[in-house]
Image: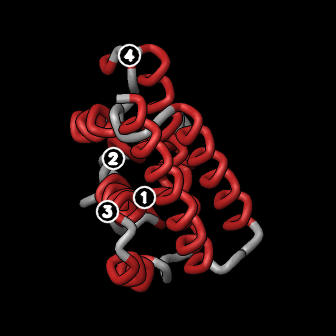
Amino acid sequence: LKLRPESEGQDLETIVRLADGHLNTAIRLCENVDDQLSVVFKKWMQCCFIGNGVETMKFIADNGTIGRESQKAFVKYGLHFYVEYMKYFAIGNIDMLRLTNAERMSVQKLRNKLDFENLEKIIEVLEHMSKAVERNASYKMLLLSATIKIHHYFRSSYTTTAKAG
């Protein structure tokens, strides 16, 4: 994969994890993913957490026109990230996760900001996005709808945690 010209400048570690051992899938991801998935996803999650409408609309304008394969890869990355986070939530051992060091730091920061119930709801939102992308739904509308829902889940978790503490 490293020797292929389309993989130059790509986040190969993430792409290999997303491809789950399938070389053809990894090659397709390299051909169709322009930005580093983890960086863009982290930026989106910050928009979801903060809930600033102006920043959210700017993010959607900047990232809402990517190609369909890139959309699929983005949503698949999000599902991968949150499934790994769910493992961390259940097990508590960060070393068992298939994540980069930067992603592990993000997971540790999320630990106090997202409860298990809302984590499941976020995964459901991402699964819905995945199906909708397959059916050629408007990606900008999907991002906006998902951002609003995920923001609500973050706020709900934060309020619940604050009440419990």
Rounded to the nearest angstrom, the CA distance separating label 4 from label 3 is 25 Å
- At a point 22% along the width and 40% down the height, the residue shown is 102
The mark that comes first in sequence, 4 or 2, is 2
| Residue pointed to by mark 4 | 92
Label count reads 4
Q: Amino acid at mark 3?
A: Lys
The mark that comes first in sequence, 2 or 3, is 2
- Say whether residue 114 is visible: yes
Left or right of 149 on screen, residue 2: left
Name the mark nearer the viewer: 1 or 3: 3
Regarding mark 4 in the picture, which secondary structure is present there? loop
Q: Amino acid at mark 1?
A: Cys
* Contact between labelled residues 4 and 1, with CB atoms less than 8 Å apart: no
- Point out residue 59 in the picture as x, y percentages from the top left corner: 37, 77
Name the mark nearer the viewer: 1 or 4: 4
Q: Residues within 10 Å of mark 1 (few under 14, many from 20)?
A: many
| Residue pointed to by mark 3 | 43
- Point out residue 74 in the picture as x, y percentages from the top left corner: 49, 59
* Contact between labelled residues 2 and 1, with CB atoms less than 8 Å apart: yes
| Residue pointed to by mark 2 | 12
As drawn, 47 above or below 163: below
Q: Kindly indicate the quadrant of the structure image that contains residue 75.
A: bottom right
As drawn, 104 above or below 38: above
* Contact between labelled residues 3 and 2, with CB atoms less than 8 Å apart: no
Regarding mark 3 in the picture, which secondary structure is present there? helix
Name the mark nearer the viewer: 2 or 3: 3
Q: Amino acid at mark 4?
A: Gly
Q: Residues within 10 Å of mark 2 (few under 14, many from 20)?
A: some
The mark that comes first in sequence, 4 or 3, is 3
Q: Amino acid at mark 2?
A: Leu
| Residue pointed to by mark 1 | 30
